[in-house]
Amino acid sequence: MAIIPRIAAVSYLNTIPFIYGIEHEGNFRADLLLTPPAQCAENYMAGKVDIALLPAAVVPSLRMTDIVTDYCIGATGAVRTVVVVSDTPIEQVRRIWLDAHSRTSVQLSGYLAANKWKIAPEWLHLADYSLLDRPAEGDAYLIIGDKVFEHEGRFRYSYDLAEEWHKLTHMPFAFAVWVARKGTSYEITDALEHALTFGVEHIYEAVAASPYMGDDGGLRAYDYLTRNIDFIFDDEKHRALKKFWDAGLRIVPRSY
């Protein structure tokens, strides 16, 4: 009897091509669990899944795990959906409220604060998103994923973390990568690779089959997936992640 892998992936617009490929590539079968990025890591570490699209920041801490496939959630410039927003210039920010849905974005915020923005803010856990409707002076907010679209243009200042990283390092970035437990068969990882390829080659079809089709015929979603997201985990993104991992920065907000 064929083994059906359990896979955890992110429940955001940026993974729609991957999900489409897994669900529609004719030769691949999997049990798929969709959650926010941080929950993907928790499910993987708890043994609930065999393969996962994980926040890049957690990968160095994982044992008996390999990065698999040549795909990721990455960006070569502005990613648009990972931002720090504020009504205060970033150099004057005293506190940053952190969206806990992505560990990579939290760590990247800390890296940029130390190395680009040259600030040492207080780090706080953003659990109540209504705080974004009443921003305090000197406060900034890390927000990620689809919720960013709802807040575009509502703050004086918006700092795209992939763009800020690129300005500092002249490198692209990978926010999430595919991993599997050591011992996962090559037949499964190769089949996953083919499924992801199918999805990335059928982005418009993926949008059309998703809740993101919208009144505009999916054009905004398609534009985002083809302009802001770079799905290929190439050598340059490997080098960028090594630089990020080697920094060894750990941000631990007060209320985490």
Image: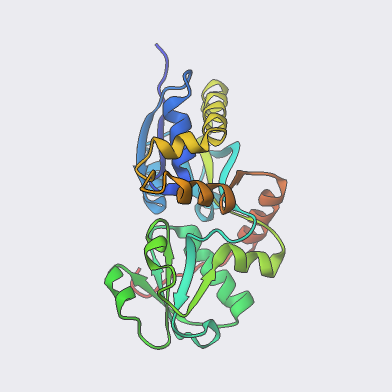
Across and down, in percent, residue 244 comes to 62, 60
Across and down, in percent, residue 237 comes to 66, 51
Q: Nearer the viewer, residue 110 or 203?
A: 203
Across and down, in percent, residue 33 comes to 35, 38
- How many marks the image carries: the answer is 0
Q: Nearer the viewer, residue 256 or 99?
A: 99
Across and down, in percent, residue 238 comes to 67, 49
Q: How is the image coloured?
A: rainbow
In the rendered view, does 41 fall on the left or right side of 167? left
Query: Does the image show residue 64?
Result: no
In the image, residue 244 sits, relative to residue 64, either above or below, namely below
In the image, residue 162 sits, relative to residue 157, either above or below, namely above
Query: Does the image show residue 228?
Result: yes
Judged from this view, the residue extending furthest toward the front is 216
Q: Quadrant of residue 9?
A: top left
Judged from this view, the residue extending furthest toward the top is 1
Task: Identify the image quadrant of the C terminus.
Answer: bottom left
